[in-house]
Image (cartoon, rainbow, N blue to C red):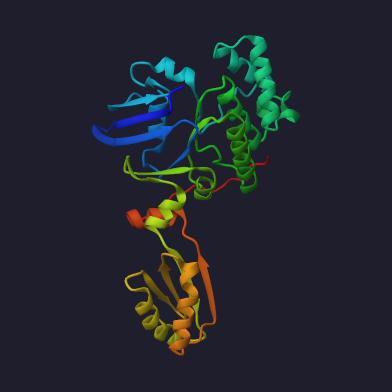
Amino acid sequence: MTSTMIRASGLTRHFNVKKEKVEAVSGLDLHVEHGELVALLGPNGAGKSTTLRMLTTLLRPTSGTALVAGHDVSTEPKAVRGRIGYIGQGNGAAHSQRASDELTSQGRAYGLTTATAKTRAAELIGTLGLDAVAGRVVSSLSGGQRRRLDIAMGLIHTPPLLFLDEPSTGLDPQNRANLAEHVRDLREASGTTMVLTTHYLEEADQLAERVVIIDHGTVIADDTPAALKSAHAGDRVKLWFDHDHDARKAMVTIGAFAGTAPLRHHGSGVEVELADGAQLTPKLLRALDDALVPVAGVEVARPTLDDVFLSLTGRSLREGEPGAGEVAA
């Protein structure tokens, strides 16, 4: 087993649209080690799904190289496919098949014997909480159940590397949380390397050990969620005052205290970005008290991955984010 599951260098993909070249991915570099769970984040059109489709051999790179599970995606696509699982954005199971039969058929397609495929299907049905619906046809399953079945289909041949492209899109918050819990349990049980794309920043923050942010088809940041937030976004300290003139007076003291930190005034409130808001806020309150500016309220908000992207690009990752549909479990 190679310790590096993905090594992509200078990966590029162009499309021709109405006689014009569109660069979906441009010189992308990506390394993923065995056992990691890496989230790819970026706004719509950033190149996330195109990157996954190249890494899973569904699209041939225009240029660059990528080794996936020890095999070249361009010259050894069959070997790559045998070593990975891929959960796309659409449901992959046939609607007229029973869930258990669809899993067994998927296992047979990967070369498992019928007995092994049935045993593996039963294991995954239990692990992913599908026991009650294993005998039902896929078309009768809810959105949450279908997504869990899709994950089971991607894992039926026990791949060392699993790709999940927007696995929780269309699920309500409860089912997104349930799906995230299943992903954690699977990793603890099998140590599978996972790469996922998602629009849900909280999901990436909670699940991923590393976050790779992609914009305009190239990687602009790559680190742990905590390190990215520490390096590129501070805590947002919000202070409220009884009167607008108190807020304006507070701006002077806060500006002197925070130096070049971003500072915003809105009505009777002031917001400042501090590198360590939890530690510095008491000192800031004492400075305001010394300046005879009474504070009516205070709130410290930790930075998000969207704040990181905003700091890096001046835009929000949430632009164009799809809503969470109401899909039952």
Residue under the image location 40 percent in, 59 percent down: 233
Q: Quadrant of residue 253?
A: bottom left
**Horizontal side, residue 206 vs residue 135: left or right:** left
Res 294 visible? yes
- Location of the C terminus by quadrant is top right
Is 164 displayed left or right of 101 in the figure? left
Residue farthest along the right direction in this orientation: 132
Outermost residue on the bottom side: it is 292
x 65%, y 10%: residue: 114
In depth, the one of 187 and 317 nearer the eye is: 187
Q: Percent x, y for residue 214?
A: 36, 43
Q: Position of residue 12 (x, y in %)?
A: 29, 32
What residue lies at 49% left-to-right and 49% top-to-bottom? 201
Question: At x 49% / y 61%, what residue is drawn?
Answer: 302
In the rendered image, is residue 317 in sight? no
When asked about the image quadrant of residue 106, the answer is top right
Compared with 211, 306 (above or below) is below
Q: How many marks?
A: 0
Q: Position of residue 309 (x, y in %)?
A: 38, 53
User: What is the x, y in percent for residue 246?
Assistant: 45, 87
Quick one: 265 or 36, which is closer to the camera? 36
Q: Nearer the viewer, residue 62 or 260?
A: 260
